[in-house]
Amino acid sequence: MTTSKFELSRNSYGRLTLTQGDGEGLVFDNVAPVRAFPVQAPLDGIAIVCSDGKEVGWIDRLEDLSPASRALVQEELGGREFMPEISRIDGVSSYATPCTWTVQTDRGETAFVLRGEEDIRRIGNDTLLVSDTHGIHFLIRDAINLDKHSKKILDRFL
């Protein structure tokens, strides 16, 4: 697939609007960007869907868009998606589950409760997805390059 031709803007209610073609095509109000591969390729393969779920636009690579449209897509995705990325594991309350993890993320320090080892899923060779008791997913993008202390803790759970 290739990036489809469209223009993005916000309507008077602050909702995203897509106009197909070069401003002369169909107009779709209240559209939303949806990542096809949110973990493995977050900047590639983004569908623009209308409120009934029908795909009305496709973005092959985010960099294909104009700076204004790219900013709108990133702003919209940022408001809808919440997946903090763990950069360091400071400590755990216990090596038996459930236990509380204290971690550093790209959004600051936080603590969460891990129910069981099954809540740590391997997504790729180096990528892990950790789910807490509230259903929030934390991403460890590169487990191999974590610091020694973090790897030692993580190894106890894998």
Image: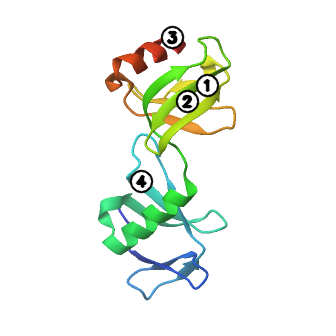
Could you tell me which residue is drawn at 58 percent across and 85 percent down? 12
**Nearer the N terminus, badge 2 or badge 3?**
2
**Colouring convention used in this rendered image of the protein:** rainbow
Residue under label 3: 156
Residue under label 4: 45
Residue toward you, 114 or 70: 114
- Tell me the distance, in whole angstroms, between the alpha carbons under discs 2 and 3: 14 Å
> For numbered disc 4, what is the local secondary structure?
strand
Q: With respect to residue 26, does 57 lie above or below?
A: above
Mark in front: 3 vs 4: 3
Residue toward you, 138 or 99: 99
Crowd rating for badge 2 (residues with CA inside 10 Å; few <14, some 14–19, many 20+): many
- Tell me the distance, in whole angstroms, between the alpha carbons under discs 2 and 1: 6 Å
**Nearer the N terminus, badge 3 or badge 4?**
4
Crowd rating for badge 1 (residues with CA inside 10 Å; few <14, some 14–19, many 20+): some
Crowd rating for badge 3 (residues with CA inside 10 Å; few <14, some 14–19, many 20+): few
Give the percent coordinates (x, y) of residue 142: 37, 30
